[in-house]
Amino acid sequence: DEKSGFVGVLLTILIYFVLLVPAMITLYMYLIGIHLNGRISDLYRRLCGSYESFFVPHDCEISIDELERACYRYRNLKWIDRSTDYVAIYNSEHKGKDTIHRHFFRLQDGTLLEIIDRKDDTPG
């Protein structure tokens, strides 16, 4: 049957799918990566990510290298030659007892060194 419309229908469906697939891929890439500055891909990473990838250190946490550097600098300070300022912040109670909340040394070059007293952190 030369006058059958079956071949035309097949060609129309084939052309429709050939044009639809790149359009859907483009729409998918736009929605995932570009729309709202990639919030969908960020949401997917946050929902499916491992615990280690979202590790946030504590406020006072420092690396071993930074601790060693600070200890080395502190050990090699020449306290006699340098002038330092000492700043202490106290907690005052009604009974007249003052306890040190935080205390710092300010060196001549402007560096602030916090003195952390770990004996107050132990329970009991």
Image (tube, rainbow, N blue to C red):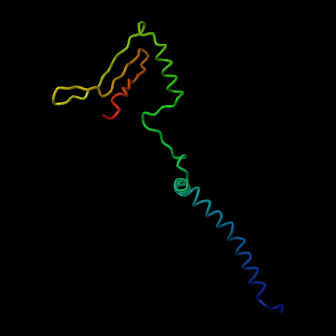
Q: Residue at x 30, y 28 (%)?
A: 101
Q: Residue at x 37, y 14 (%)?
A: 84
Q: Residue at x 52, y 22 (%)?
A: 69
Q: Quadrant of residue 6?
A: bottom right
* Rendered view: 25 above or below 3: above
Q: Is residue 110 left or right of residue 98?
A: right
Residue 48 in percent (x, y) is at: 55, 56
Residue 3 or residue 6, whichever sits in front:
6
Residue 100 or residue 10, whichever sits in front:
100
Residue 3 or residue 58, whichever sits in front:
58
Q: Quadrant of residue 65?
A: top right
- Quadrant location of the N terminus in the rendered image: bottom right
Question: In the displayed image of the protein, which residue is found farthest to the right?
Answer: 2
Q: Quadrant of residue 29?
A: bottom right
* Rendered view: 64 above or below 48: above
Residue 72 in percent (x, y) is at: 51, 18
Residue 59 in percent (x, y) is at: 42, 36
Q: Residue at x 52, y 23 (%)?
A: 68
* Rendered view: 63 above or below 73: below
- Quadrant location of the C terminus in the rendered image: top left
Q: Is residue 7 left or right of residue 91?
A: right
